[in-house]
Image (cartoon, grey):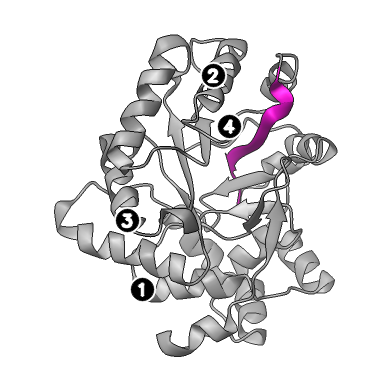
Amino acid sequence: MRNDAPDIRQDVERRTLTLPDETELPVVGQGTWHMGENPAQKKDEVRALQTGLDLGMTVMDTAEMYGNGGAEYIAGEAVQGRRDEVFLVSKALPGNAGGSRLIQACEESLKRMGTEYMDLYLLHWRGGFSLEETVEGMEKLKRDGKIRRWGVSNLDTDDMEELWEAESSEHCQTNQVLYHLGSRGIEYDLLPWMRNKRLPVMAYCPLAQGGLLRRKMLEHPDLQEIAAGHNASAMQIMLAWVIQAGDILAIPKAVQTQHVYDNAQAASIRLTDEECRTLEQAFPAPDRKQPLDIV
């Protein structure tokens, strides 16, 4: 499946999921964490995001925290001239998640991205503002046309239950959390809770962070064998596993062109039930409640 650039667009399958407001999105999007930190990488980062858009990965996730706003500048440059194609997501820091601070944070993010609205605005993680106040602010931003939808990030099950007590909480579109084959803690209670509410997960770090954990995962013989059977890379299989169920949207970050192609092609990989069982036995989920994995 690892084809050259001119051929890959014919091989990419358009797999989608549906948000609670009936918006249809591709199951593989693009992350921007650590982008906008090194001016020397700017052209490559913009090019990577634009290539991803060409391949149908039209969900682009960023945050005011990433590169102190630098990633939002990169995202904004990548979508110039094609804003209508993109489902643009950003996130507010907890210290900006209520009252006039939320309004100001949103406006500053919009300015950095050079756009009049966000398709989705998330609370990055919980802070000092109440969830009720955050929801009120998000609803105001919607009424003012500055955002079209809102959601949350890094909220565990008890947080989501508290959120659901707030007025207009049913307008929440997603909870963005860390989830990959080596970090399956959300499967104990958070993922079932969200599925019960028909609320899709947006999975960040779906390929795990670079480092020892990912190296050990990629070297696992079961993962390598399944990858060989699909003529794919081990990381493509990891990504295919995350999106297998059809209600999880993954946002891997890539700068190298080949990695962008690989991520797009992962949407075309269909794992068998037996392959999923093999992977899940190799990388088992915890059998008890775990603290929410956050990076």
Residue lying at 65% horizontally and 84% vertically, measured from the top left: 230
Q: CA–CA distance between discs 4 and 3?
A: 23 Å
Q: Earlier in the sequence, mark 4 or mark 2?
A: 2
Give the residue type that dot 2 points to: Lys
Q: Nearer the viewer, mark 1 or mark 4?
A: 4
Residue lying at 70% horizontally and 14% vertically, measured from the top left: 166
Q: Which contiguous range is marked in magenta?
A: 168-181
Residue 171 part of the magenta segment: yes
Residue lying at 65% horizontally and 81% vertically, measured from the top left: 225
Q: Nearer the viewer, residue 266 or 55?
A: 55
Residue 220, image x, y percentages? 59, 69
Q: Earlier in the sequence, mark 4 or mark 3?
A: 3
Q: Nearer the viewer, mark 2 or mark 1?
A: 2
Give the residue type that dot 4 points to: Trp
Q: Residues within 10 Å of mark 1 (few under 14, many from 20)?
A: some
Q: Earlier in the sequence, mark 1 or mark 4?
A: 4
Q: Residues within 10 Å of mark 4 (few under 14, many from 20)?
A: many
Give the residue type that dot 1 points to: Thr
Tag 4 and tag 2, C-beta contact below 8 Å: no
Quadrant that contains the N terminus: bottom right
**Where, by quadrant of the figure, is residue 152 drawn?**
top right
Q: Nearer the viewer, mark 4 or mark 2?
A: 2
Residue with the mark numbered 3: 80
Residue with the mark numbered 2: 140
Tag 3 and tag 1, C-beta contact below 8 Å: no
Horizontally, residue 225 falls left or right of residue 261, namely right
Tell me, for residue 150, which label it has, or none: 4
Residue 139, image x, y percentages? 58, 21
Q: Nearer the viewer, residue 49 or 145?
A: 145
Residue with the mark numbered 1: 257
